[in-house]
Amino acid sequence: MTRIDNRKSDQLRDIKITRDFTMYADGSVLIEAGNTKVICTAMIEEKVPPFLRGQNKGWITAEYNMLPSATHTRKTREMSRGKADGRNVEIQRLIGRALRSVVDLEKLGERTVWIDCDVIQADGGTRTASITGAFIALIDAFSKLKAKNMIDSIPLKTYVAAVSVGISNQEPLLDLCYLEDSNAEVDMNVVMTETGEIIEIQGTGEERPFKKDEFAKLMELAELGIEKLIKIQKDNSDSIII
Ligand code: UDP
């Protein structure tokens, strides 16, 4: 079967990283995965939430949103709806958990890192692109702290990236675009470290239940994609973190 954009089943979309995309954030990255485009920023605040005060530990938190014009039909702003969008909340918690799991919070000290992921164009895989891009923004933000001698070393334990995988017309595919995603029988988002350790898997039998061997095949594809994404992260960061 040929894919909509003629990719091989194990091929990522073209990834483009633009660092220092905006000027005020400590780390600011535009990540493009095919037609999906997300601005990921990291800003450091010299305080922690009340539940962590006095513990000599830092915190990472994330917010995610989409511009009204990021999708085919205009997406109403949360402000105009008057309530939080459940999908945004779900995704921002995933991003926060993914990054927090690889940060050494003690080494970070009593500081909060605010990660903001704003989707300017959505074509599938916005949450996974957010995690992959935000990680680069996080390295840049930590590098600035280190340059100011506010930390001794980059408080990251390993690299982390995320990718989507799915089964469409019985075929396991890496990095689904929107049309593939909307027709997928099975849909998964995988967050993984450099050494192939799993941070989070969101796997759904959208149109049918799936078998363990299909899950294994999807994980194989995800691991392949994440290896490539981490290589791209390394090519786009100045600091060696481990
Ligand atoms: N999408 C959309 N409007 C929405 C939510 C999603 O057009 O309100 C599209 C968009 O292209 C998105 C894709 O559906 O990237 C898949 O959405 P999903 O919720 O699976 O999250 P994602 O794959 O972006 O992480």
Image (tube, helix red, strand yellow):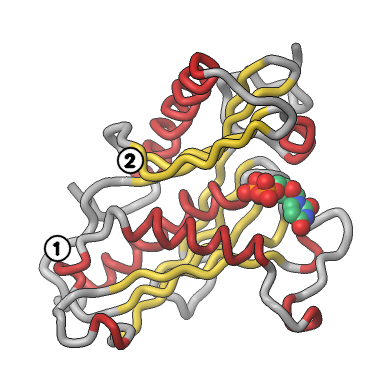
- Residue at the image position 56 percent from the left and 41 percent from the top: 15
Q: Residues within 10 Å of mark 1 (few under 14, many from 20)?
A: some
Q: Position of residue 160 (x, y in %)?
A: 36, 46
Q: Quadrant of the N terminus?
A: top right
- Residue at the image position 22 percent from the left and 86 percent from the top: 53
In this rendering, the label closer to the viewer, 2 or 1: 2
Q: Residue furthest top?
A: 1
Amino acid type of the residue tagged 2 in the rendering: Thr
Q: Earlier in the sequence, mark 2 or mark 1?
A: 1
Locate residue 210 relative to residue 152 in the image: left or right.
Answer: right
Q: Position of residue 202 (x, y in %)?
A: 53, 42
Q: Residue furthest left?
A: 152
Q: Quadrant of residue 82?
A: bottom right
Q: Residues within 10 Å of mark 2 (few under 14, many from 20)?
A: many
Locate residue 13 relative to residue 182 in the image: left or right.
Answer: left
Tell me, for residue 153, which label it has, or none. Answer: 1
Q: Relative to 230, say whether 99 is above or below.
A: below
Q: Count the labels in the image.
A: 2
Tell me, for residue 193, which label it has, or none. Answer: 2
Foreground pick, 86 / 23: 86
Q: Position of residue 151 (x, y in %)?
A: 15, 72
Report how far apart the C-alphas of labels 2 and 1 lie in the structure: 19 Å
Q: Relative to 27, say whether 196 is above or below.
A: above
Amino acid type of the residue tagged 1 in the rendering: Ser
